């Protein structure tokens, strides 16, 4: 999924300067963003209050949307560099195409993981014959400098490991949780897990003290460390935790995101992550001239044009509040 905001502004991310090195409970409110003609998403990262959680730098939550009589998700070809995209569904299907030739339908609790590396382009759309409801999350992971120029590639994992406890099933989509490790390729220490809680569940989830964490509420009613979360909201939890109390008043779905605080300073503009203004300017030029990012074959529509760059210089900085 792309950042389709035509008034894109640079996000200055990374660095440890504003990492909270102790447990906190910081509720992040979403910003509603139109994605094409028929999909509206709730954007949790980057947020005015917090830009990153570990290497996680972009989080959109969408649905549940009734698309029975609608085209559903329609995201034309667009470019990425310096990041990984993580596609995660609770309901519906998304057809992924990219410039490496990948063609894959992603369904609920299946991992679609695209590593852009130095440059890739892709599209995402609901299949013509699709389920009535569409509900999921789209997430980006920033690549560290040592790996951000790697070859672009796409991974699909239909089966993922799980951790279970009374009333809880945790599907590990990225990294390691407790004794389970995802087959998805990671480049920094991090974790992403989908948590399904049955009504009446009261459990404690094991965590890593050196990781910072956040929890995205997908559905139902749940309390995270005593804080009630409604779907589409996210709670930042800081570092220094060995475990996380979870309680569900109804059947509920959450996503746990975490990782070691990302030390590097970044510029994130539109769908690119770089380290300097020159990199972003060159990426925009290459995309608009049809160079470097390749061609997505099979999508019925034109690629997205890049937004204009802001009139002020883009400077890499650390985390900002």
Image (tube, rainbow, N blue to C red):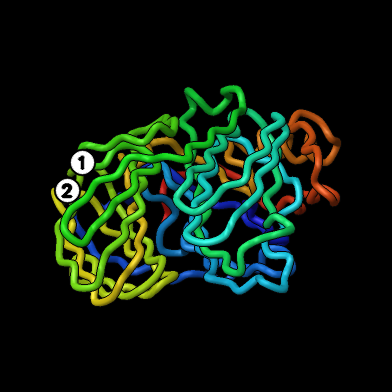
Q: Pointers 1 and 2 in contact (CB under 8 A)?
A: yes
Which of the image's four quarters has the C terminus? bottom left
Specify which label sits upstream in the sequence, 1 or 2: 1
- Please report the residue visible at 44 percent of the width from the left and 54 percent of the height from the top: 51
Q: Is residue 139 above or below residue 229?
A: above
- Looking at the image, can residue 145 be seen? yes
Q: Residues within 10 Å of mark 1 (few under 14, many from 20)?
A: few
> What percent of the width, then of the height, locates residue 140?
51, 46
- Please report the residue visible at 44 percent of the width from the left and 70 percent of the height from the top: 232
For mark 1, what is the residue?
178
- Please report the residue visible at 43 percent of the width from the left and 36 percent of the height from the top: 264
Front position in the image: 47 or 79 = 79
Q: How many marks?
A: 2
- Looking at the image, can residue 17 be seen? no
Q: Residues within 10 Å of mark 2 (few under 14, many from 20)?
A: few
Front position in the image: 141 or 308 = 141
Q: Tag 1, which secondary structure?
A: loop
> What percent of the width, then of the height, locates residue 292?
76, 28
Q: Is residue 260 left or right of residue 68?
A: left
> What percent of the width, then of the height, locates residue 110?
48, 46
Front position in the image: 256 or 249 = 249
For mark 2, what is the residue?
206
- Please report the residue visible at 65 percent of the width from the left and 67 percent of the height from the top: 39
Residue 299: numbered disc: none
Q: Is residue 139 above or below residue 297?
A: below
Tell me where residue 149 sits by quadrant: top right
> What percent of the width, then of the height, locates residue 23?
19, 57
Q: Is residue 14 above or below residue 117?
A: below
Give the alpha-carbon distance from disc 1 to disc 2, as whole Å.
6 Å
Q: Tag 2, which secondary structure?
A: strand
Q: Is residue 84 left or right of residue 179?
A: right
Tell me where residue 226 sits by quadrant: bottom left
């Amino acid at each position: 999924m792309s950042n389709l905001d035509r008034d894109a502004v640079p996000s200055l991310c990374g660095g440890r300067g504003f990492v909270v090195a102790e447990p906190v409970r910081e509720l992040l409110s979403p910003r509603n963003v139109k994605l094409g003609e028929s999909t509206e998403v709730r954007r949790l990262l980057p947020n005015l209050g917090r830009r990153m959680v570990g290497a996680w730098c972009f989080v959109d939550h969408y649905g549940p949307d009734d698309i029975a009589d609608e085209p559903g998700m329609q995201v034309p070809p667009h470019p990425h560099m310096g990041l990984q995209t993580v596609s995660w569904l609770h309901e519906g299907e998304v057809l992924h195409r990219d410039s490496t030739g990948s063609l894959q339908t992603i369904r609920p609790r299946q991992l679609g993981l695209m590593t852009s590396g130095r440059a890739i382009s892709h599209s995402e759309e609901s299949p013509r014959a699709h389920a009535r409801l569409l509900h999921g999350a789209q997430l980006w992971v920033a690549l560290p400098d040592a790996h951000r120029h790697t070859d672009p590639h796409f991974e699909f994992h239909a089966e993922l490991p799980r951790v279970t406890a009374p009333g809880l099933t945790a599907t590990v989509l990225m990294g390691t949780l407790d004794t389970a490790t995802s087959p998805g390729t990671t480049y920094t220490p991090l974790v992403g897990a989908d948590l399904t809680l049955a009504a009446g569940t009261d459990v404690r989830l094991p965590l890593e003290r050196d990781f910072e964490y956040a929890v995205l509420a997908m559905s139902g009613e749940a309390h995270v460390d005593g804080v009630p979360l409604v779907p589409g909201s996210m709670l930042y939890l800081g570092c220094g935790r060995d475990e996380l109390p979870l309680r569900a008043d109804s059947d509920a779905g959450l996503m746990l995101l975490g990782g070691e605080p990302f030390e590097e300073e970044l510029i994130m503009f539109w769908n690119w992550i770089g380290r300097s203004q020159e990199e972003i300017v060159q990426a925009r030029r290459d995309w608009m001239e049809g160079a470097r990012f390749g061609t997505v074959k099979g999508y019925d529509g034109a690629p997205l044009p890049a937004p204009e760059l802001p009139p002020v210089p883009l400077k890499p900085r650390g985390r900002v509040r």
